[in-house]
Amino acid sequence: KERPPWGWAFAGLLIGLLLVLAVTAPARWLAAAVALGTRDMVQLRDPQGSVWSGSARLVLTGGAGSQGSAALPGRMQWRLETSGLGVRARVTSDCCTPGEPLDLRVMPRWGGAQLMLADSKTQWPAAVLAGLGTPWNTIQPQGELSLSTKGLSVEWLAGRIAMEGGAELTARHMSSRLSTLQPMGSYRMTLTGGDSPSFDLSTLEGALRLSGKGQWVGSRLRFNGEASAAQGMEAQLANLLNILGRRQGARAIITLG
C-alpha cells in the first residue's frame, strides 16, 4: 500500500506560502532593507502599500546616530517587477519627477551588482542635502538642483566602481545661511563614465566662484578644487569660504580623498 504523498503536499504548501508572502510583503520590509543598505542615510518613512507597489516619505540623514534629517516634500511612489535575474523599479515623486518616472534596473553580478538608469531629467530642492550631515547641515544650502542622465550605468565589483555613460547636475540660484548674499551663484557638475569615472565642477554665474576636478580611484573619490569670491564680495562670503576649504589667501582650497 502506497503512503500518502505528505512530503510533496507539504513542499507545495510551503512554496505557495512563500509566493504569497513575496507578493504581499509589506512596504516596511523594503524600508528596512533600504535603511540597512545605506547605513540609515536614506530612509523610507511612513511606508504604505507593499514591497512591489507602495509609497513613503524619502528622508536623508547623516547616518546612524545622526540627529539631523531632511525630507523631500510630498511622497515618493514606486513599482517593482522582476527583470531576468534582477529587479526593475519605476519611481515617481510629487516634487521631483515632472516628466517620466525614474526607471532603474538592478542586476546581480558575481561579487557585486550593476545599476542601470534610463535617460532621465529630475528636479530636487537643494535644502534636502542638509540632512546628510557635515558639512551640509552647516552650510544649509538653498536652491534648485536639476539632474539629467544619459546612458548611465554603475557597476560594483570586488569593491571597485565602474561607470558608463554620464550625468549633469545643475545647481541654480544657490544660497546659504552662512552668507547674506542671495543668491550666491549657479553651478554645473558633469560626470563622465569610463575605467576611471571623473567629474568637473564649474561656475555658471555668481559672486561665489567654484571650480575643480574629481575622479574615482577604486572605490574612493578624490577631488581637488577651489572656491573664491568675486571682487568686492569677499566680506559677504568669508564665513562660507572658511567652511568650504583650507584658506590660501583669497581662495579656499577644497580637497577630498
Image (tube, rainbow, N blue to C red):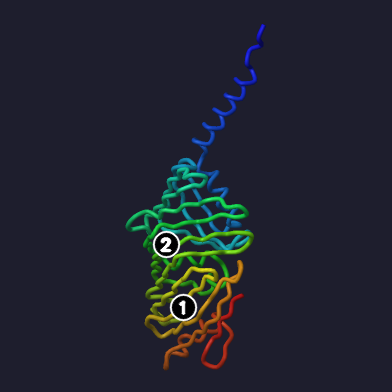
Residue 150 is left or right of residue 41, and the answer is left
Residue type beneath disc 2: Gly
Task: Identify residue for label 1.
Answer: 201
Residue type beneath disc 1: Leu
The image shows residue 105 at horizontal and vertical percentages of: 47, 52
- What secondary structure is marked by label 1? strand
Q: Quarter holding the N terminus?
A: top right
Compare residues 169 and 44 and report the one nearer the observer.
169
Task: Identify residue for label 2.
Answer: 151
Residue 99 is left or right of residue 235, and the answer is left
Mark 2 neighbour density, 10 Å: few (under 14) some (14–19) many (20 or more): some
Quarter occupied by residue 121: bottom left
Compare residues 53 and 189 and report the one nearer the observer.
189
Residue visible at 44% across and 84% down in the picture: 208
Residue 37 is left or right of residue 49, and the answer is right
Earlier residue among tags 2 and 1: 2
Residue visible at 47% across and 90% down in the picture: 235
Q: Is residue 140 above or below residue 83?
A: below
The image shows residue 51 at horizontal and vertical percentages of: 49, 42
Residue visible at 57% across and 59% down in the picture: 156
Rendered image: mark on residue 53: none
Quarter occupied by residue 175: bottom left
Q: CA distance from mark 2 to mark 1?
A: 20 Å
Quarter occupied by residue 62: bottom right
The image shows residue 14 at horizontal and vertical percentages of: 59, 27
Q: Is residue 47 above or below residue 256?
A: above
- What secondary structure is marked by label 2? strand
Compare residues 243 and 180 and report the one nearer the observer.
243
Residue visible at 52% across and 92% down in the picture: 250
Asked if labels 1 and 2 touch by Cβ distance under 8 angstroms, the answer is no
The image shows residue 117 at horizontal and vertical percentages of: 44, 57
